[in-house]
């Protein structure tokens, strides 16, 4: 279907209505024509076209190589000449043709490549393409999308800087009373501005959800999550105005900012002696991440964020110290939890944000006399934690990383599944 969609798009590109398939059928574009016939959305049709055009480009390049540099194209090969200029992704094309990846995954990789191909070297783009295709065969589209954001940032830091500057300019927040007397809040915030709000509100909501699920809690709570979020924001504002409610879990709220030690050294080296005359490239070299956000951030943005309260800058790549407590303590400490967040990146199974997760003993504390050590701990959200405790899945630590073992009745692959941050490691 993808090559057919691309060919329909090619034959619909003419501005002359008599020569355009889509216009002759009464549609303004090939995407609308295809969507109508497939009973789907135009966006789905556009993704199908993009995958087909990439397959056609790969086919054209293969035929040229077979013919030699001096060989020409003739017959059906001439139909491929109108494929739009852009990056050729032969590994994506092969994986699409062999059905190793789906249309959504292929289209997402192609879209990323089209955004960065003028900035990235062909070698770097080819390496990223192969890595993304390999990962796409084991990740759902949401997790693949998070990985694509990291890859895109690493391939074009300039684009990421431009995006951050635009987001800072476009940040806004409006608070007003509507016609019904309700207080309406509307706005969009850049990451550095909005992240502390997001982290604090999520900490309160997570605590309220835990209390709601606790059967020992005698006070019923029938609030929805959006209602809890509204109440959490109000509680934060009341706290700032002088409320001394000790139940707010604000001190437990931690935002971990991380970047590689080499990127930090490069940034400091660029800034050293540059003073106020430092260029943007000198000030903003390197990228890093923040727990809870899929979008990477430049070193300059991370530096500004790390200057805020309750933000822990965590430099990676240096020596680490074990945080093991044996059986002297049952609960994992705050420092151990930070180390687990660094290793697992949130729920080691499903990727839920760290604020949603509990530190789970792999060998249980009571039944198995398990130790409160990093090699016996894993971060799990409540749903995955329950699934592990019910015994349907098992988790082990291999080479310092969590690995999940599916039950015999699992309908997917019975091979061990890598968990934690390694699933999203761009530099494997």
Image (cartoon, rainbow, N blue to C red):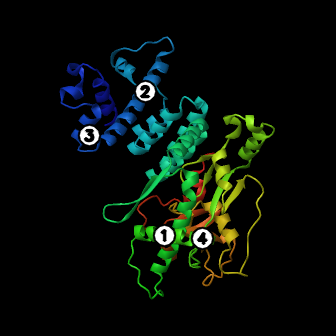
Q: Which one is nearer the viewer's eye here, 270 or 248?
A: 248
Disc 4 and disc 3: Cα gap in Å?
A: 49 Å
**Residue located beneath label 1 in the image:** 234
Residue 354 versus residue 130 in the image, above or below:
below
Which residue ends up furthest to the left in the rendered image? Answer: 25
**Residue located beneath label 2 in the image:** 57
Q: Position of residue 134 (x, y in %)?
A: 52, 45
Q: Position of residue 427 (x, y in %)?
A: 63, 45
Disc 4 and disc 2: Cα gap in Å?
A: 54 Å
Q: In the rendering, which numbered label is found on residue 35?
A: 3
**Tag in front: 4 or 2:** 4
Disc 1 and disc 2: Cα gap in Å?
A: 55 Å
Q: In the rendering, which numbered label is found on residue 254?
A: none
Q: In the rendering, which numbered label is found on residue 250?
A: 4
Tell me: 341 left or right of 95: right
- Ranked by sequence position, the earlier of labels 4 and 3 is 3
Q: Residues within 10 Å of mark 1 (few under 14, many from 20)?
A: few
* Callout 4: SS: helix
- Ranked by sequence position, the earlier of labels 1 and 2 is 2
């Amino acid at each position: 279907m993808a090559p057919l969609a691309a060919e329909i798009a090619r034959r619909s590109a003419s501005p002359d209505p008599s020569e355009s398939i889509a216009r002759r059928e009464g549609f303004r574009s090939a995407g609308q024509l295809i969507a109508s016939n497939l009973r789907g959305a135009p966006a789905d049709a556009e993704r199908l076209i993009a995958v087909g055009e990439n397959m056609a480009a790969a086919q054209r390049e293969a035929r040229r190589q077979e013919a030699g540099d001096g060989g020409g194209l003739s017959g059906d090969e001439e139909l491929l000449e109108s494929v739009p200029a852009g990056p050729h992704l032969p590994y994506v094309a092969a994986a699409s043709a062999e059905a190793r990846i789906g249309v959504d995954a292929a289209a997402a990789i192609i879209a990323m490549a089209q955004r960065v191909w003028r900035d990235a070297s062909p070698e770097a783009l080819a390496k990223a393409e192969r890595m993304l295709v390999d990962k796409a065969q084991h990740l759902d589209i949401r997790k693949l999308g998070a990985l694509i954001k990291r890859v895109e940032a690493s391939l074009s830091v300039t684009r990421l800087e431009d995006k951050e500057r635009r987001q800072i300019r476009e940040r806004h927040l409006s608070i007003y009373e509507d016609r019904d007397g309700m207080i309406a809040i509307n706005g969009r915030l850049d990451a550095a501005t909005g992240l502390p709000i997001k982290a604090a509100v999520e900490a309160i909501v997570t605590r309220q959800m835990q209390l709601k699920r606790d059967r020992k809690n005698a006070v019923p709570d029938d609030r929805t999550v959006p209602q809890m979020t509204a109440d959490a924001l109000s509680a934060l504002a009341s706290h700032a105005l002088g409320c001394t409610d000790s139940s707010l879990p604000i001190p437990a709220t931690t935002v971990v900012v991380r970047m590689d030690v080499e990127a930090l050294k490069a940034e400091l080296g660029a800034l050293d002696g540059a003073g106020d005359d430092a260029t943007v490239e000198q000030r903003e070299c390197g990228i890093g991440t923040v727990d809870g956000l899929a979008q990477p951030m430049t070193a300059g943005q991370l530096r500004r964020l790390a200057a805020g309260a309750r933000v822990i800058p965590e430099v990676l790549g240096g020596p680490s110290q074990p945080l093991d407590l044996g059986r002297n303590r049952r609960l994992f400490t705050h420092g151990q939890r930070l180390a687990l967040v660094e290793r697992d990146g949130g729920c080691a199974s499903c990727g839920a944000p760290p604020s949603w997760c509990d530190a789970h003993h792999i060998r249980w504390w009571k039944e198995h006399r398990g130790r409160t050590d990093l090699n016996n701990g894993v971060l799990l959200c409540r749903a995955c934690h329950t699934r592990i405790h019910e015994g349907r899945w098992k988790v082990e630590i291999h080479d310092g990383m969590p690995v999940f073992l599916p039950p015999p009745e699992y309908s997917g692959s019975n091979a061990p599944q890598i968990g934690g941050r390694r699933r999203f490691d761009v530099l494997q």
